[in-house]
Every structure is written in structure tokens, then in C-alpha cells.
Image (tube, helix red, strand yellow):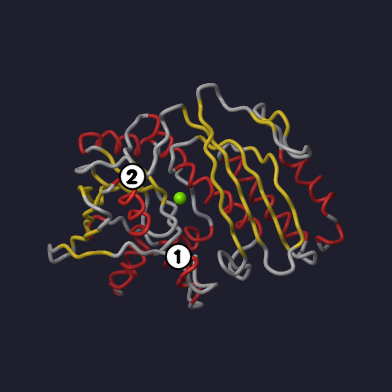
């Protein structure tokens, strides 16, 4: 069946039936606006991301369900980077009228499954016929206790830089897909179905451990650059400390230029944060309790946004803070 045969209002009815109810949702899908509650003493945090077919995803490589999961995950990653608790989500979907209904329903299944995983309610959105590509627009809202959210600008000279998980897997997975090569399952999963570090972000924020934090969507160097400029800082990174997965490291050994993907590849959706040196052991204990690996990768110093990388020769080499830039790149390149 094609979407055009079902029609917009029946589609919205189906979404409403599956969206479920949460006590914080006073009015959700089906009214002119959502009416929602957040806990007393909390502030509202909001973020949004667009995903466009042939720019961010290809149906040759993914399906509706995985796409739905990723659309939610990349948005939740931004809330995680602020230390917020995710609560509500809005989905804007534009797709051609001749889209397979199964693909649309798969997308919805993925969106709802990822929402449920993180305790988030789908409370509204919009649907529209697209003359061309699929376009997904997601808005997420979360909350954090007053004074507990973490911005990009709080880093201090001598703070340690830490990162969760591993770097470069998603970019390497995408690069192998683009070349039509076999992609190891972990790299594929890291590209098509990333896990936002929601619990870690919340834990770092509520314990007041992270002085600055950002999620890595445009690449380590680019997102570190944002954090440095916001805090008027420079950073020194240690090449040997950059966390790499076994799959990435295996390919890196035979092709050292792949380190560029760990430094500049996008879509890791890991958390990059700074902590006072004496707080680092507490962070490591807390991350171990959450079963999230974290690594110390460098240090901040006063400055103006420069990044130096200590390489195997012991010398410092400058790293440009470039990453993926949508307006500087050709459509279809990445991410
Ligand atoms: Mg972000």
C-alpha cells in the first residue's frame, strides 16, 4: 500500500494510537498544541535536527525503522550534551505520496521504540507531501534542575578533556559503505544506529562534574573547537589516548591516514567534556557504573581555540578544527 492511499489524517490517527500516554502529557497529538508538564524547579531545554534523504541517509543503506531510531537518537544526543533529562519529542515528516506505507510505519516504529527506550513521549509534529526527498525534522525537549545544565563555555585552564566511547567508527562505516566494501557490524551499527549517551550526560551534570560539554556530531576537532572558542581556551590532545574500537584500530594499523576519521569524521554522538583533574577518578567510577567507557584524551589551557596533537614522536602538531560543514560540502558527501 502507498501512503497516498491511506491519506494524511488516517496516518496521524495511526501515529496517535501508537504514541501512548504519559502523565506529563496533558494534551498531546490531536490538539492544536501540546500542553506539557515539567518538574518544579526545572528549566526547559530544546533542540532540533533535520535529516534529509541523500544528505544524511540513503534507503539503499538503511530502512525506515533504523532511520526512525537514528532521527531520535541524534536529537537526544544534543540534550545529553547539556545534561538534560529528555521528555518530549515532535516529529515532522515530509515524504512523497507514493512512499511505501511499510516504510512509513517502520519509521514510526523506530521513532517510538527509541522514545520508549529513553522515557520520551511523542507529543506532536506535522506531516506533508514531499515533491522529492524524504525530510525528517525532529524537535526534542527535556529538562534539567535550575543551575545544573552544562554548556560549552565552562571549561577552565588545566581541566582534563575526556570523551565517552570510541572515535571514528561511524565515519569509517560510512566510508566503507560509500566504497561498496564489507562493513564490520559494529561500524555499521555506529553509523546507522548510534546510542546517545543520555545517562552519562545526566549523571555528569547532576553531580556537577563536567565544567563544559558537547556531543560529537561534526567530528572531534570541530566540536572541540566549539568548546574551546566558547571558553577562550586551547587544547592539547594526546594521539595515543584517543579511544579506538578494535574494528577501527584493525584498519588503522594498515592505514594510518584513518586517524583523520577519528579526528574529523562526524556522527560519533559521543560526549566530549572537561573536568577538574581531581574529579576525573569520580567521573571514571561513575561511568563504570553506567557501563560507558570514558577516556582522558588531553588537557585545556588558556588560549583562543587552537588544538595541538601530541603525536608518536612526542612533538606537538597543530590540528585544524574543521569537521563536516553542510554549506562547504557537496550534497551526498556526509554525514
Ligand atoms: Mg550537538
Q: Are marks 1 and 2 in contact (CB under 8 Å)?
A: no
- In percent of width and height, residue 156 lies at 25, 41
Farthest residue to the top: give it: 40
Identify the element where label 1 is drawn.
loop
- Going 65% across and 45% down the picture, which residue do you hit? 90
- State whether residue 139 is above or below residue 267: above
Identify the element where label 2 is drawn.
strand
- Image quadrant occupied by the N terminus: bottom right
The residue pinned by badge 1 equals 325
Quarter of the view holding residue 312:
bottom left
- In percent of width and height, residue 317 lies at 19, 65
- In percent of width and height, residue 82 lies at 44, 40
- State whether residue 175 is above or below residue 69: below
- In percent of width and height, residue 20 lies at 71, 36
Looking at the rendered structure, which numbered label has been put on residue 87? none
Mark 2 Cβ and ligand 1 under 8 Å apart = no
Mark 1 / mark 2, whichever is N-terminal: 2
Q: How many marks?
A: 2
Q: Nearer the viewer, mark 1 or mark 2?
A: 1
Kindly report the distance in space between the C-alpha atoms of the residues bearing marks 1 and 2: 22 Å
- Going 18% across and 60% down the picture, which residue do you hit? 310
Farthest residue to the right: give it: 5
Farthest residue to the bottom: give it: 179
Q: Please state if 101 lies on the left or on the right of 50 as rendered.
A: right
Q: Circle 1: is it few (<14), some (14-19), or many (20+) Cα within 10 Å?
A: few
- Going 64% across and 51% down the picture, which residue do you hit? 110
Q: Please state if 28 lies on the left or on the right of 192 as rendered.
A: right
- Going 22% across and 48% down the picture, which residue do you hit? 299
The residue pinned by badge 2 equals 273
Q: Circle 2: is it few (<14), some (14-19), or many (20+) Cα within 10 Å?
A: many
Who is closer to the viewer here, 300 or 205?
300
Amino acid at each position: 500500500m502507498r501512503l497516498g492511499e491511506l491519506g494524511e489524517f488516517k496516518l496521524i490517527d495511526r501515529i496517535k494510537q501508537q504514541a501512548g500516554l504519559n502523565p506529563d502529557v496533558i494534551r498531546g497529538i490531536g490538539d492544536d498544541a501540546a500542553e506539557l508538564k515539567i518538574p518544579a524547579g526545572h528549566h526547559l531545554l530544546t533542540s532540533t535536527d533535520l535529516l534529509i534523504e541523500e544528505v544524511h541517509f540513503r534507503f539503499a543503506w538503511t530502512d525506515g525503522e533504523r532511520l526512525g531510531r537514528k532521527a531520535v537518537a541524534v536529537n537526544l544526543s544534543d540534550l545529553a550534551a547539556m545534561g538534560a533529562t529528555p521528555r518530549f519529542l515532535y516529529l515532522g515528516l515530509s515524504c512523497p505520496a507514493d512512499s511505501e506505507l511499510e516504510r512509513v510505519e517502520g519509521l514510526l516504529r523506530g521513532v517510538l521504540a527509541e522514545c520508549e527506550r529513553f522515557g520520551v513521549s511523542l507529543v506532536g509534529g506535522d506531516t506533508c507531501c514531499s515533491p522529492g526527498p524524504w525530510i525528517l525534522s525532529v524537535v526534542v525537549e527535556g529538562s534539567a534542575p535550575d543551575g545544573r545544565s552544562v554548556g560549552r563555555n565552562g571549561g577552565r585552564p588545566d581541566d582534563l578533556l575526556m570523551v565517552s566511547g570510541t572515535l571514528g567508527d561511524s565515519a569509517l562505516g560510512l566510508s566503507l559503505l560509500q566504497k561498496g566494501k564489507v562493513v564490520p557490524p559494529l561500524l555499521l551499527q555506529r553509523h546507522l544506529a548510534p546510542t546517545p549517551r543520555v545517562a552519562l550526560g545526566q549523571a555528569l551534570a547532576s553531580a556537577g562534574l563536567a565544567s563544559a560539554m558537547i556531543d560529537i556530531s561534526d567530528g572531534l576537532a570541530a566540536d572541540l573547537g566549539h568548546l574551546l572558542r566558547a571558553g577562550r581556551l586551547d587544547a592539547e590532545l594526546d594521539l595515543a589516548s584517543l579511544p579506538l574500537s578494535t574494528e577501527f584500530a584493525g584498519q588503522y594499523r594498515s592505514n594510518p591516514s584513518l586517524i583523520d576519521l577519528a579526528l574529523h569524521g562526524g556522527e560519533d554522538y559521543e560526549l566530549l567534556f572537561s573536568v577538574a583533574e581531581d574529579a576525573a577518578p569520580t567521573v571514571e567510577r561513575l561511568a563504570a557504573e553506567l557501563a560507558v567507557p570514558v577516556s582522558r584524551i588531553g588537557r585545556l589551557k588558556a588560549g583562543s581555540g587552537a588544538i595541538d596533537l601530541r603525536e608518536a614522536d612526542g612533538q606537538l602538531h597543530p590540528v585544524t578544527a574543521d569537521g563536516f560543514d553542510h554549506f562547504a560540502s557537496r550534497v551526498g558527501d556526509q554525514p
